Image (spheres, rainbow, N blue to C red):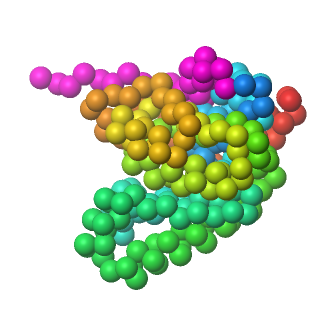
Amino acid sequence: MNAARPQRFADRSAAGSMLGELVAAQGLGSDVVVLGLLRGGVPVAEPVAARLGASLGALAVRKLGIPDEPEVAFGAVASYRRQRVVHHVPHIHEYALRRFSPAALETVEHQASAKLRHLASKFEAFAPDCAGRTVVLCDDGLATGATMAAALRVVSLSGPASLAVAVPVSPAKVLRELSAYADAVICFRSPPDFSSVGTYYEDFSQVSEPAILRLLADFGTKK
């Protein structure tokens, strides 16, 4: 018997529109900042911010992939307003260390950190102050939760009043783990047979940096 096809979002913007209604129902208050994780999280964050009447920004993150399994993240690095955090997913990091030397994993971190600095500098103009405000972090979905955990940890250094995660799709286990870093974790769909984020989208094409810059600039003109 063929497995049932999972319900899919049309694209990131459509997922963000649906997620925005769910987030709005939480009553997060009036002084809200919505940050999209670069790059795929920003098209999700934009309709969420529009629905909430919130500020919109972008947060630079880079996954730390296992050398021969780059899609499997043993951690992530994140940067926001010149603060930087390295986060390791304990059980995946331990697995990676059993297979590779600490030096090999440090090389991955150094390479990711260099790319992170470039990304953060490119989007520096779109990093609203979070001090004393409610911050909602959005991505297009979560697999290991490494990038979101790093993002939460780096934003917490800015002194927000509260932190929330909002994503269209994620495994339930990852949502539970992220509750250690966030005051609220909001997810539109948490399938028991989760496979990969892209499985839940009709259009999951790459998002270019110029497209994200245009989206952020256009949102600013509408405010």
* 112 vs 127: above or below: below
Q: Position of residue 124 (x, y in %)?
A: 77, 56
Q: How many marks?
A: 0
Q: Position of residue 59 (x, y in %)?
A: 66, 50
200 or 26: nearer the viewer: 26
Indicate the quadrant containing the N terminus: top left, top right, bottom left or bottom right. Answer: top left
Residue in the image at 60% along x and 67% along y = 115
Q: Residue furthest left?
A: 1
Indicate the quadrant containing the C terminus: top left, top right, bottom left or bottom right. Answer: top right
Left or right placement of residue 95 versus residue 154 in this view: left
Residue in the image at 36% along x and 60% along y = 90
Q: Was residue 190 drawn as part of the magenta stretch in this picture?
A: no
Q: Where is residue 75 in the image (x, y as percent from the top left)?
A: 44, 60
* 188 vs 142: above or below: above
In the image, the segment drawn in magenta is 1-28
Left or right placement of residue 37 versus residue 106 in this view: right
Q: Could you tell me if residue 219 is visible in this image?
A: yes
Q: Quadrant of residue 174?
A: top left
10 or 111: nearer the viewer: 111
Q: Could you tell me if residue 43 is visible in this image?
A: no
* 222 vs 214: above or below: above
Q: Where is residue 162 in the image (x, y as percent from the top left)?
A: 65, 39
Residue in the image at 30% along x and 66% along y = 94
32 or 16: nearer the viewer: 32
Q: Was residue 18 drawn as part of the magenta stretch in this picture?
A: yes
Residue in the image at 59% along x and 59% along y = 78
